[in-house]
Image: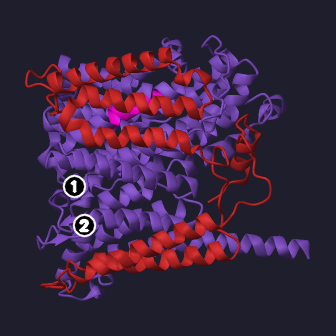
Amino acid sequence: MDIFNALMHGFALAITPANLLWCLVGCALGTAVGVLPGIGPAVAVAMLLPITAKVDMTASMIFFAGIYYGAMYGGSTTSILLNTPGETASMVTAMEGNKMAKSGRAGAALATSAIGSFVAGTIATVIVTLFAPYVADFAVKLGPPEYFMLMLLAFTTVSAVLGKSTLRGMAALFVGLAAGCVGLDQISGQGRYVGGIPELLDGIEIVLVAVGLFAVAEVLYAVLYEGRVKDSENKLSRVHMTARDWKRSIPAWLRGTAIGAPFGCIPAGGTEIPTFLSYAAEKKLVKDPRDKAEFGSTGAIEGVAGPEAANNATVTAALIPLLTLGIPTSNTTAILLGAFQNYGIQPGPQLFTNSAPLVWALIASLYIGNVMLLVLNLPMVGLWVKLLKIPKPQLYAGILIFATVGAYGMRQSAFDLFLLYGIGLLGVVMRRFDFPTAPVVVGMILGPLAEAQLRNAMSIGEGSAMVFLQRPMSIALIVVVLAVLILPRAFKVMGERRLRAAGA
Amino acid sequence: MSHPELDAGRRDSAYQPIDPPEGGWPTWPQLLVGIGVLLTGLGLAWGAVGISSDAGYGGVGPNFLPWLVAVVLTVCGGWMIWEARTGGFRELEDPPGARHGNWTGFVWVSAGLLLNAALITRIGFIFSCALCYLLAVQGLRRAAGQSAAGRPRTWLVDIVTGLLIAAPVFWTFTKFLAINLPGLTASGWL
C-alpha cells in the first residue's frame, strides 16, 4: 500500500491548478512539436531548459514530461498524414499508416494510434508505478563498478547496436564523450580542453549541443538539400473506428505494449527494435486472409496499432532506467537528465527517497497527461493538422528564434551562439554522412558520470581493474555488454553462411 | 542494424529524393570527414598531453578519458579514411534530399545566425532575432525556388513576421518565465 499512498500524494501535488496547467501546456506543446517537421521533443525540451533557472522543479518536470509524451502522439499524426519518413520512432507506424491514409482511412489510423498510445502509455505508467520503486531499492545496492558497467551497456547499445554502422556510431559517441570532457574535471577540479577560453570552464551546455545538432542542423540541412522537396499530404477523414477496427486493434495494442515495455526498462534504448518487432509480430499473427492482404497494400490497422503502442510503451518505460538508475537511453531522456542536473539533482536510486514528492508527482502527471493527450489528439486532431500547413521557410526560420532563446537564455553568452552555429555545421555533416546523433548527446551527458563511476570503482579496487571481475553483478553486466556486441554480428555471419550454403 | 522490410517500406513511400544519384557518390567528401575525425583525435591527444595524470588512489587520473577519446577518435578517423579509399563508407544510406547543396541559401541562413550572435547584445533580442529570421527565411525561400523571395513586398512581410514572432517570444520568456534575454533599452519591453 506504500506505493498507492505515495502515488496518491503524487496526484495531490500534480492536480494543483498551476501544475495541471503546466501539464496541459506541456502536452499541447509536445503534440505541436511532434506534428511539426524539423523539431522534436529532445530539442523542444532543450530549448526550454533555461526555464529551470526560475520555474519550480516539480512544475517544470511535469511540463517536460508532457512535451516528451505529447511528441509521441503528435509524431504519429504526421507520419500518417505526411508521406515523408519521419523519425525512427514513427517510421514503422508510417509504413501501414500511410497506406491506410491513401486508401481513405486516415481517420481510423489516427484513432487507433491515439487510443493505442493511450492504452500503452497508461499500462506502461502502471508498470513504472509498480516496478520503479523496486528497481530503486535494488539499485541502492549497486556500487560504482556496477554503475560503470550499466553505463557502458548504454554506450554500447546506443552506438554499436542501434545504428547501421558501428564505426560511425563509435565516432559519434566519442565526439560526445570529448564534448563532455571540456571544462573542469569533477574529481580533481582541473580544467580540461579549456584552451584559455573562460566560457569553456563551465563545460559545454547540453542545450547548445542538442539545439545545435537538431534544430540548427535541421534548418541548415533543409536550406542546403531539401529546398525543393515537396511533401504530399493525405486527406484527413473522420476520426472514427468501426467495431471491426476495435476488434483488430485491441489485441494489437496489448501485444505492442507487451513488446515495448521490456525494451524501455533495460538501459539499452531505442524504439526502432520494439516497434519493428511489433510490426513483424502483427504481420505474422494476422489470420483472416482479408486482413493479411491489407498489409502492404491498402494498409492494415494492426500494423499501426501494434507499433504505435510499442513505441509509447517503450518511451514511457524508459523512465524507469532514467529515474532509478540515472541512465538515459535516448536523446530526450538524456536532456531530461540534464534538467534534473540543473536543479542539482542526480536521478538514481536515492531519488525515490530524497525527492519522493517530485517523483510521484511526475508519475501521477503521466496518468493525467495521457488522458489530456487522448482528448487533445482525438477530437482536436483537425487543429493539429493545420500546423502542417505552415510553409517550410517560415517554420524553419521561426525555429531559429526559439533556438536562440534556448542557447542564449541558458547562460547569457553570445559566445554560445557562435558555438551553436559550429555545432549546427557538425550536425549537417553528421546527417549527410549518416552518423547517428543520439550517441553524441548520450555520450556527453553520461560521459562525465561514467568517468566518475570508473574512477570511484578503481579507487575501491585500489587501482586494480580486477574490481570489475570480483563482483557478481559487474561480471554479469560485462557478459551482457559482450553479448550485445557479439551476438548480432554472430547471427549475421551465421545467416550469411546459411545463405551461401543454400546457394551452393 | 538494417531491416529489409523497413527499408522496403521506405522505398515504397511517396518520398523520393529530387535528383536520384546517377552512378555512385564521390568518395572524396567521405575522405574529408575521415580526415576531420582523425585530426580531431590528434588535436584531442595534443590537448590531453597537458592534463595531469595524478590518479590518487584510483590508478585512473583526469587524463585517462581524454586519452581514451583521443586514441579512439584517431583510430575511427583512420578507419574512415581507409573505408573512403576502398570504395566508400560501409552501410551508408543515400542522404535525404538533393544531391547538390544550395549554397546561396546556406550563406543567407548562415549570415542570419552569425549576425544574430554578433549583434544580440548590441541591438537586443527582438531586433537581432527578427534580422536572423529575415535572412534565414529569405535563404530558405530562395532554396525552395520561390521567385517572389526578392520582391519588396516579401521582404516587408518577412520583416513584420520576424518582429511578430520575436517580440512575443521575448516578452513571454523575460516577463513570465524570468529568463534573461538582452533588450535594447533598460525598460525590458524592447
Residue placed under numbered mark 1 in the picture: A349
Q: Amino acid at mark 2?
A: Leu
Image coords of residue A5 (percent x, y): 19, 33
Where in the figure is residue B61, as x and y percent of width and height?
20, 81
> Which structural element holds mark 2?
loop
Left or right side of A221 for A500: right
Q: Which quarter of the image is occupied by the C terminus of chain A?
A: bottom right
Q: Is residue B53 visible?
A: yes
How busy is the neighbourhood of tag 1: few (under 14 within 10 Å), some, or many (20 plus)? Answer: many
**Based on the displayed image, in which of its 4 quarters is residue B180 positioned?**
top left
In the rendered image, which quarter contains the N terminus of chain A? top left
Q: Nearer the viewer, residue A174 or A404?
A: A404
- Where disc 1 sits, the SS reads loop
Q: Residues within 10 Å of mark 2 (few under 14, many from 20)?
A: some
Q: Nearer the viewer, residue B40 or A29?
A: B40
- Circle number at residue A33: none
Q: Chain of mark 2?
A: A
- Is A231 a magenta residue? no
Q: Is residue A170 above or below residue B130?
A: below
Quarter of the image for residue A406 reads: top left
Residue ID for mark 2: A142
Q: Which colour represents chain B? A: red
Considering only vertical position in the picture, is A456 above or below A118?
below
Looking at the image, is A207 positioned above or below residue B34? above
Indicate yes or no whether the magenta region holds residue A397.
yes
Chain part drawn in magenta: A395-403
Badge 1: chain ID:
A
Residue A433, picture quadrant: bottom right
Chain shaded purple: A
